[in-house]
Structures are given as C-alpha cells and as structure tokens.
Amino acid sequence: MRYVDKVGQVIKRFINIKYVTSTNSVTLKAAIEDILAKHSLSIHRIRGQGYDGASNMRGEFHGLKALILNDNPQVFYVHYFAHQLQLCLIVVTKNH
C-alpha cells in the first residue's frame, strides 16, 4: 500500500498476505476487500491499481481491474511491466 500522510510524505507499507483458494477475479476482489476492512480502509478510497497481464487481473469486463473500477470509477490502472521482464529473463535463462 502507498499513501500520503498528513505532512505530504509518501509512505509505502506492506499490509498483508492472504491465502486464496482460487485466483479468479471475484475471489481476489473479496480477499482485497477483506484485507482493507481489517485495516478500516475502503475500496472507494483506492486511487491506483497495477497488475500483470493475466486475464483474471486486467480483463475488460470481468477482471479484477474491472470489478474494482465498477465500485470506484476514479481509480487508475497501470500495467505492471516488471512481470513481463521477469518472464523474459526466465525464458533466456532456460536457453543458456
């Protein structure tokens, strides 16, 4: 999580790891909402989200991105390109 405190400093915090039985977008959204609720936070206060290119994350109609945008149309989405770099490195290292 990243937020701006009362003095204007950007603070980054790791808040939780949660085991999920499924990686479909509905289950992931429920897990996020549960984590936010435990910290007295709301999905309506999210301003940005970033995921890799998996369809369950970025799907235009049923992906996690879309489900969060349905609840909060002001949230920005940024594609997480570091995941693509990781996939490229894995392919290169397997060939050498």
Image (tube, rainbow, N blue to C red):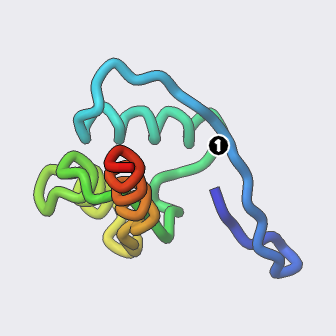
Counting from the top left corner in percent of width and height, residue 92 is at 36, 56
Question: What residue does disc 1 label?
Answer: 40
Where is the N terminus found, in terms of image quarters? bottom right
* Closer to us: 57 or 74: 57
* Closer to us: 38 or 18: 18
Single out the residue that lies furthest toward the bottom. Answer: 8
**How many marks on residues?**
1
Counting from the top left corner in percent of width and height, residue 22 is at 28, 24
Single out the residue that lies furthest toward the front. Answer: 96
Left/right of residue 84 with respect to residue 44 in the rendered view: left
Counting from the top left corner in percent of width and height, residue 76 is at 40, 74
Picture residue at 56% right of the left edge, 42% below the top: 36
Q: Is residue 35 visible?
A: yes
Q: Is residue 49 visible?
A: no
Amino acid type at image mark 1: Ser
Answer with the quarter of the image where residue 69 lies.
Answer: bottom left
10 Å crowding of disc 1: few (<14), some (14-19), many (20+):
few
